[in-house]
Amino acid sequence: MDVNAAVAAVAAIAGLCTGVIAMLAFRWSERDQARPTRSSMRPDINAVLPPGVDTVLSVLRSSAVVLDEADAVVKASSAAYALGLVRGGKLAVEPMLHMARDTRRDGEIRQVELDLPRRGTGRGEALAVSARVAPLGSRLVLLLVEDLTEARRIEAVRRDFVANVSHELKTPVGALSLLSEAVMDASDDPEAVMRFAGRMQIEATRLTNLVQELIDLSRVQNDDPLEDAEPVRVDTLVAEAIDRCRHTAQSKHITMAAGGTADLRVWGNRSQLAAALGNLVENAVNYSPARTRVGIAGRRVSGPGGDLIEIAVTDQGIGIPEKDRERIFERFYRVDPARSRATGGTGLGLAIVKHVAASHGGEVTVWSSEGQGSTFTLRLPEAAATRTTAADSESVPATTPAPEVLP
């Protein structure tokens, strides 16, 4: 055999081996493609859902869940996971699962409102939802869930507010009606007429204060205080609050003293800030026994978003029980209703303070100990240095301390 023949034979053998290897590789590839894998067992969402449905579900505000004929979750929005509707690839709410099966069976659209346990709170809070189930094609079921918790809370607050306003208005109006009848019956007794007339003045003042505070609360809730904001001197706010309560403090021999850091400014609506601080000082005076002290002090503190101004109002009054401290900023909530009636309180003052603080980007907090007193702290953003030039012309100098009311 010559060299050319040998080369040809080797080439033929190599070609045969290459063909065998290629054939085996093709077979192996076919076998691998036929073998089910984890990814191939998952349904192709784009192939299962009708065209365009995936896009629509992604922009819905409702929590959306799509179930197949085996009750497996084909598609679920992130809100559905956040509400705890889907866990482990399954719909976790049994009543909704029953609705989905019934709709798959008869094709009817169903809707129901449910109270679901809120996961992770440990306080038994309920999550109010509205669930609507409808068929989606021939094999799928669409579940849309709306979170109604906040809407129900707002509705409950509205109902309570209307009921409380009605009750608070009914009390002085009823008293005025009875007192007017008493005056008519005692027309021949000047001393009784004077006594009843004095009571009528008290009830009329109470009614006026209640209506005014309702107006103030509505204003701070609806208006944007930063539209007409300006740099406001804390010294000026403190002086106005002390002047507002001067007569009541003098009658009870309560000393009101101002202190803290001078030349502080906050940015906001002057009238609302004055009303908020005035309410805090007025409460401190009203709920303090005679011959005690009420202090108002401001200081600058550092916060994550910049410097803050803290205005603390401290009294030596009766204090607030621990169980009531979380609720004292609610509208019409009173720790001691009998004492509130005696002092003329409406139960709206602290609610106004809370709304003013929040609308100015701040907060109000309370520390209290029964029998020792309370400290309410109004925390507000400090006015920037570039904004304080307009306040330099105010009449109260930065170094002038607010006046004291001496016993």
Image (cartoon, rainbow, N blue to C red):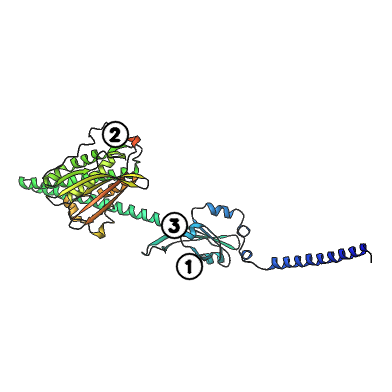
Position of the N terminus by quadrant: bottom right
Residues 76 and 40: in front is: 40
Q: Secondary structure at mark 1?
A: helix
Q: Amino acid at mark 1?
A: Glu
As measured in the structure, the alpha-carbon distance from the residue carrying label 2 to the one carrying label 1 is 63 Å
Residues 125 and 285: in front is: 285
Q: Position of residue 57 (x, y in %)?
A: 54, 54
Crowd band around label 2 with a 10 angstrom C-alpha radius: few (<14), some (14–19), many (20+)? some
Disc sitting over residue 147 in the figure: 3
User: Measuring 48% from the left and 67% from the top, which residue is drawn there?
Assistant: 94
| Residue 11 picture quarter | bottom right
Q: Amino acid at mark 3?
A: Asp
From the image, tell me which residue sits under label 1: 94
As measured in the structure, the alpha-carbon distance from the residue carrying label 3 to the one carrying label 2 is 47 Å
Side of 182 relative to 114 (left or right): left
Q: Amino acid at mark 2?
A: Ala
Between circles 2 and 1, the one closer to the viewer is: 2
Position of the C terminus by quadrant: top left
Decide: marks 1, 3 in contact (CB < 8 A)?
no
As measured in the structure, the alpha-carbon distance from the residue carrying label 1 to the one carrying label 3 is 17 Å
How many badges with numbers are in the image? Answer: 3
Decide: marks 3, 2 in contact (CB < 8 A)?
no
Q: Position of residue 200 (x, y in %)?
A: 14, 46
Q: Secondary structure at mark 2?
A: helix
From the image, tell me which residue sits under label 2: 391
Is residue 220 something that shows in the picture?
Answer: yes
**Mark closest to the chain's N terminus, 3 or 2:** 3
**Mark closest to the chain's N terminus, 1 or 3:** 1
User: Measuring 92% from the left and 64% from the top, which residue is drawn there?
Assistant: 5
**Mark closest to the chain's N terminus, 2 or 1:** 1
Q: Position of residue 272 (x, y in %)?
A: 28, 41
